[in-house]
Amino acid sequence: MWRYIIRRIFLQGIPVLLGFTFLLYLLLTIAPGSPVSHLRGVPNVDPSVIAQREAQLGINESFPVQYGKWLIRTLKGDLGLSFDSARRPVSELIMERMPATILLSVCSIIVGWGIGIPVGILSARYQYSIFDYIITFLAFVGISVPSFFFGLVLLYVFALRLNVLPAGGFFLAGEVRTFVGYFQYLILPTLTLGLSSIASVARYMRSSLLEVIGQDFLRTARAKGLSENVVVYKHALRNALLPILTLMGFMIPSIFSGAVIVENIFAWPGLGSLAIQAVNERNYPVIMGINLMFAVLIFIGSLIADISYAVVDPRIRYE
Amino acid sequence: MKKSMLAALILCLVFGAVAAAQEPVKGGTFRYALTTNPRGMFNPVLYTEAYDSYIINVVYDGLIDIDENLQPQPKVAKSWELSEDGTSITFYLHEGIKFHDGVELTAHDVAYTYMVMLHPEYTGVRYGNFKVLSGAEDYKAGLTDTVPGIEVIDDYTIKFSTDEPYAPLLVQFGYGILPSHLLAHIPVGELETADFNRNPIGSGPFKFVEFLTDQHVLLEANQDYFFGAPNIDTLVFQRVALDALPIYIRQGRVDYAEISPENYAEVSRINGIDTYIYEALNYSYIAFNLRQERFNDPIVRQAITYGFDRETYVEILREGFGIVANAPMPPSSWAYTNEGINEYPYNPELAAQMLADAGWKPGAGGVLEKDGMRLEFDLLVPEGSRTTEQMVLLFQQNMEDIGIKVNLVFMEFSAAVDRVDAREFDTFTMSWSLTVDPDPYGIWHSSVPWNDPGFYNDRSDELIEMGRTETDPEKRKEIYAEWQRLINYELPTMFLNYGVTIAAISDRVKGIETNPGPTGPLVDLNKLSTIWIED
């Protein structure tokens, strides 16, 4: 097992990450637009200043040189300085926003899985009932509705019309940070971000459970005279949950990237607005830093998923 | 009888309330909505984003302030003196102004602030504003260690001089003065990463308290402020999501916000919120690439302008939020003139006639042609503004009516800038924000790179140069009036509209400028030190 993990990291993970950063940096440099485009809007800016700025940022050099420098710095653990006027370290920009993004993501995972799993189970238990149809319909709606739209609807209803919740944002300056306060600020973005995972977890749970229910060993259990509830909740559920648990590993990265959009709608003080601003401004080091972090997360997520397969299913062994 | 008595009573009450309202009240928090997070570069010589400038404006004071009429007013400098020949300005500073750490502000701090912007290793973008100072270019190039154009006479007197008279200089002395005792030991090249920029210390009406990324910037009143402690205790710049801004205003979570025209109807209906619409110092335009022969004849540019229904664009598409523009100086500028300015009212028949008279004849597909040139061209449109996207559709349709084919090319903003910089465009639409001083050199002189249309006109250059060296405001105004008439005839770009800004402000806030000029009801935040909040 350990040999497998080490092989995955060194033979697969590192080459993939290298290739990914190489391609991303290449795309950034060949895409139209430049990190100094916005300086054009500064009144009276001297053309020599823009050339000087390009030299300071190192973007006047060729792609291999730029990428090489970035890579060497990154391998030393330094993600560089942001290209914007404040020139703050990228790692600092990311770290100060991480807690908010993690808080939002964890909450929406809890909501997504906490609601999605029971709903999926009931849906399978009462397959083809009215309840099942309603859930199936709602799940499709949940998967199809874009999160930004759902977010705006929630804002409209709860903040504007009913006026019971703040319209996004975070604590005002001087506001006491109570538990209820956190709840108020968190609930709308959490629901928005959690909606699509509720829907897809419920669908996965339903089909996974139905698959197990149709298997022979359950027919045996029923033949022994066990009640249907015991058959489903005790014997079938355990087996059906295995694939769902591994699904979590794959869904974590998508939760984080979904957070980028949702955070922008709700002015949530996480990575979202940093990421979007960086893309608009061609802020290479920040784009690289955030994407590298997401890439590592995705890699870890899929590694955990693979390992958990082996842990929960004794038939799977990695050599 | 009864009714009139009641009316009189009500009048008394109202006047009583008004009279009471004139007394400033101490205390309270003022919340200013920001829809974009500041960067945390709270340094007046290094910032580039408007959102950082808000904080800088209240933490630091400059030598001068700009008032609602865009005229310089004394601040740290209690007075100034222009030399006879117009080549130097001497500022006389107030004595006893203190930085927030208690150290006195002197002419040495002023000299430090302006020397930094000229330093060879300076990383900011303001060198262009002060390179006219005597010896600045040599200093920037590293040839000398001093700038003869910046001279500290004594602790409270400083003199700036130029080789030639340079009229736009004075109004540029508003930059916040840095405390040299805290910064002089840091190499100028490393200033941009100094911790100071995130914990600024100035001499302004508010002291910096905290900056929480993507949340807020918190400031407290400077009780020892030289020009009188502010009435409000706390000032907050609150980050708000753009979509949620009207809700924030309605919920009373912010006291002041700039809003977009789309939100105007909704916000202006909210009880307890006053809205102010005022002219902004900017204009938008469609530029022609004059390097192409087909755009060379001013008749073509004029015909296109006559042929575009700009009145409908401003009145309908912009819902009246804007003023049709015919020259590059907005009405809010003291240099603006409408004398002898052709307004090019929408007149497609005249446009078609002008083109026909100039020898353009319908060719393939009904598109006008002449000597192998064809009036079919691309219009580069930066994405992101719905109004602009509607405007170009109207333009395309109007042009089709007079035999001109416009192909719209939508592009992300910085990609469009790339194309413009490479001069790879037929026409494009963008807008310019202008400086307080009307000097058009930086955009329109034939020697500058921002002259995107490629407008090279000897008389224009001559007038622009005269305008810079003329120190008599009346004569300067005449020079710019003539220049505007020239541009209005030549139309190197088609001017679309001057912009307006809309501010929404809670009626609890008193002491604002109720008839705002281009600096708005808070006069570029200068009013924050004197407003008060009534509950």
Image: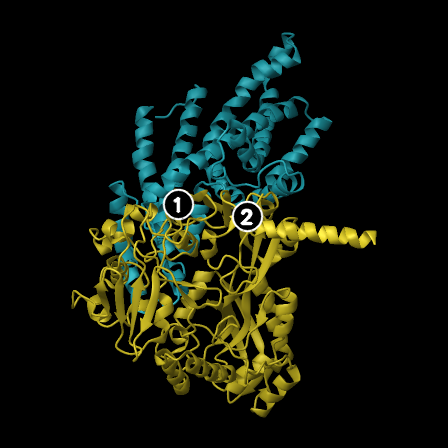
Chain colours: A cyan, B yellow
Q: Camera-side residue: A11 or B401?
A: B401
Q: Is residue A187 above or below residue B206?
A: above
Q: Residue furthest top?
A: A224
- Label 2: few (<14), some or many (≥20) within 10 Å? many
Q: Camera-side residue: B127 or A303?
A: B127
Q: Is the same chain shared between marks 2 and 1?
A: yes
Q: Position of residue B476 (x, y in %)?
A: 42, 80
The answer to whether residue A80 of the structure is visible from this angle is no
Q: Residue furthest right?
A: B1
Task: Name the secondary structure under disc 1.
Answer: loop
Tell me what residue is drawn at x 68 percent, y 49 percent.
B13
Q: Position of residue A139 (x, y in %)?
A: 63, 34
- Label 1: few (<14), some or many (≥20) within 10 Å? some
The amino acid marked with disc number 2 is: Asp
Circle count:
2
Disc 2 and disc 1 in contact, CB within 8 angstroms: no
Q: Is residue A140 above or below residue B457?
A: above
Task: Name the secondary structure under disc 2.
Answer: loop
Q: Chain of mark 1?
A: B
Q: Position of residue A72 (x, y in %)?
A: 24, 46
Disc 1 target residue: B223
Tell me what residue is drawn at x 45 percent, y 83 percent.
B478
- Answer with the quarter of the image where residue A151 lies: top right
- N-terminal of the two: label 2 or label 1? 1
The amino acid marked with disc number 1 is: Gln
Q: Camera-side residue: B52 or B417?
A: B52
- Answer with the quarter of the image where residue B160 lies: bottom left
Q: Chain of mark 2?
A: B
The quadrant of the image that shows the C terminus of chain A is top left
Disc 2 target residue: B255
